[in-house]
């Protein structure tokens, strides 16, 4: 779970960059979600066309293979921002204060290095596909667009990791500071409340108020 943005009076440039990055991550995630929806609709057309009319969608497998890069990678920075990835918190949950923020910073640094290496390798594969004119076997779709998606999406993830790296660094300097735009460990009640707020929106406050009244 990610801590909310801080009010005015906190590091302004850091918060503004986080806001700009949030908009870009939301757009990427929307494209990823849209690609899943379109692929599901295409699968329905494929099944109905093949079974009812003996008319399958040409290159359905090729299209699916290329779309996988979109929905698998374009939402990865958003997932990192909201803390939706799987985290092993058995050790971190026992730490507190500066020790916990140091451990978080070390973990983000390791991820940053891995992602930077992946960007280099995926860009190399894109350049090779572009130079050789690679295409799919069935209908000859060019493969370079899907291969370009990977380094672009990972670059956005690298920006998010860089922002979180700074966020943890400021917490290492001052453990009493408020966590801003970094994943934090939450208890079960906080996670449940956050999920209710996401699902119900404004109705969540009414539900909480009614629950408090009943108690």
Image (cartoon, rainbow, N blue to C red):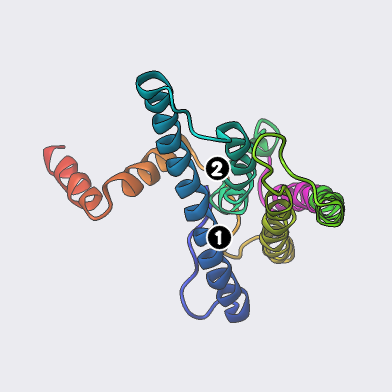
Magenta residue check for 19: no
Q: Main secondary structure of the magenta part?
A: helix
Q: Quadrant of the C terminus?
A: top left
Asked if residue 53 is positioned above or below residue 159 in the image, the reply reads above
Nearer to the camera, 212 or 33? 33
Where is mark 1, residue-wise?
25
* Horizontal relation, residue 182 to residue 42: left or right: right
Question: Which of 56 and 86 lies nearest the eye of the viewer?
Answer: 56
Q: Is residue 101 magenta?
A: yes
- Horizontal and vertical percent position of residue 115: 79, 50
Disc 2: which residue: 84
CB under 8 Å between discs 2 and 1: no
Q: In terms of depth relative to the viewer, which is nearer, 170 or 123?
A: 123
Which stretch did the figure color magenta?
95-112
For discs 2 and 1, the disc positioned in front in the rendered view:
1
Q: Residue furthest top?
A: 51
What secondary structure is marked by label 1? helix
Which residue corresponds to the image point at 75% horizontal and 55% vertical from the top-left? 151
| Residue 130 spot, x, y in % from top left | 81, 56
156 horizontally vs 60: left or right: right
Q: Position of residue 16 (x, y in %)?
A: 56, 77
Residue positioned most to the front: 54
């Amino acid at each position: 779970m990610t801590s909310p943005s801080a009010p005015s009076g906190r590091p302004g440039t850091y918060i503004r960059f986080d806001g700009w990055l949030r908009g870009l991550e939301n757009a990427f995630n929307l494209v990823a979600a849209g690609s899943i929806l379109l692929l599901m609709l295409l699968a329905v057309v494929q099944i109905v066309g093949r079974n009812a009319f003996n008319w399958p969608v040409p290159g359905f497998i090729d299209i699916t293979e290329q779309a996988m890069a979109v929905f698998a990678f374009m939402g990865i920075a958003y997932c990192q921002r909201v803390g939706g990835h799987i985290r092993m918190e058995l050790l971190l949950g026992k730490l507190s204060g500066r020790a916990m923020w140091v451990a978080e910073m070390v973990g983000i640094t390791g991820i940053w290095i891995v992602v930077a290496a992946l960007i280099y390798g995926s860009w190399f594969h894109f350049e090779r596909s572009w130079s050789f004119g690679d295409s799919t076997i069935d209908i000859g779709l060019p493969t370079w667009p899907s291969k370009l998606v990977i380094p672009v999406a990972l670059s956005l993830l690298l920006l998010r990791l860089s922002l979180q790296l700074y966020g943890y660094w400021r917490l290492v300097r001052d453990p009493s500071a408020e966590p801003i735009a970094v994943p934090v460990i939450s208890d079960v009640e906080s996670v449940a409340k956050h999920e209710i707020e996401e699902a119900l929106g404004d109705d969540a406050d009414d539900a909480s108020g009614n629950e408090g009244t009943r108690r």
